[in-house]
Image: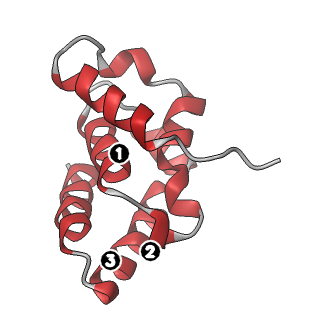
Amino acid sequence: MRTPPIPICAQKLLLMLIELNLTKIYDILQSKTVSHCFRFSLGDLSCANVNDVELCVALALALEMDPNLLSRLKVVRRIGDLLEFVRAKNIEDILKLTLGLCKALLL
């Protein structure tokens, strides 16, 4: 059974809680949670939104993030596919964020 994507309102709420320091990244760094946040990149990429990518950037930039977890989830391959898609479709708002995500993963 396929898990549905995180609803946009939940993404926005989580991003707001992180930005306001009411939730720390390490509070959500469980394998299943991280996997769920990157899950959008497994399906129809045309459904990707700014909140999906912003949440992934926040996770990738977290000092507490285990690079091995991202490797096991094959995040780089998925983000590469997303980058190709948004570049081909010229989706500017997501393209800039996806490039930021690529940079975060490199760091």
Q: Is residue 100 left or right of residue 13?
A: left
Which residue bears the numbered disc 3?
86
Q: Which residue is disc 2 drawn over?
A: 81
The outermost residue toward the top is 22
Disc 2 from disc 3: Cα separation: 9 Å
The residue at 41%/36% (across/down) is: 9
Give the secondary structure at mark 1.
Answer: helix
Earlier-in-chain disc, 2 versus 1: 1
Q: What label sits on residue 39 in the rendered view?
A: none
**Amino acid type of the residue tagged 3 in the rendering:** Val
Does dot 3 land on a helix, a strand or a loop? helix
Mark 2 surroundings within 10 Å by alpha-carbon count, few (fewer than 14), some (14 through 19), many (20 or more): some
Q: Position of residue 56 (x, y in %)?
A: 35, 45
Q: Nearer the viewer, mark 2 or mark 3?
A: 3
Residue 50 percent coordinates (x, y): 29, 55
Relative to residue 60, is residue 63 depicted above or below? above
Tell me the distance, in whole angstroms, between the alpha carbons under discs 2 and 1: 15 Å
Q: Residue at x 16, y 65 (%)?
A: 96
Where on the picture, by quarter, is residue 49?
A: bottom left
Residue at the image point whose x is 55% and y is 41% from the top: 35
Q: Are marks 2 and 3 in contact (CB under 8 Å)?
A: no
Q: Dot 1 corresponds to which residue?
A: 56
Front of the two marks 3 and 1: 3
Q: Earlier in the sequence, mark 3 or mark 1?
A: 1
Three-letter residue code for mark 2:
Asp
Circle 2 SS class? helix
Query: For the residue carrying disc 1, how many other residues have a C-alpha within 10 Å: few (<14), some (14-19), or many (20+)?
Result: many
Tell me whether the residue at label 2 lies in contact with that at label 1, contact meaning CB atoms closer than 8 angstroms.
Answer: no
The x and y percentages for residue 2 are 75, 49
Q: Is residue 82 above or below residue 57?
A: below
Q: Give the distance between the C-alpha atoms of the residues marked 3 and 1, in whole angstroms.
A: 16 Å
Check disc 3: other Cα within 10 Å, few if <14, some if 14-19, many if 20+. some
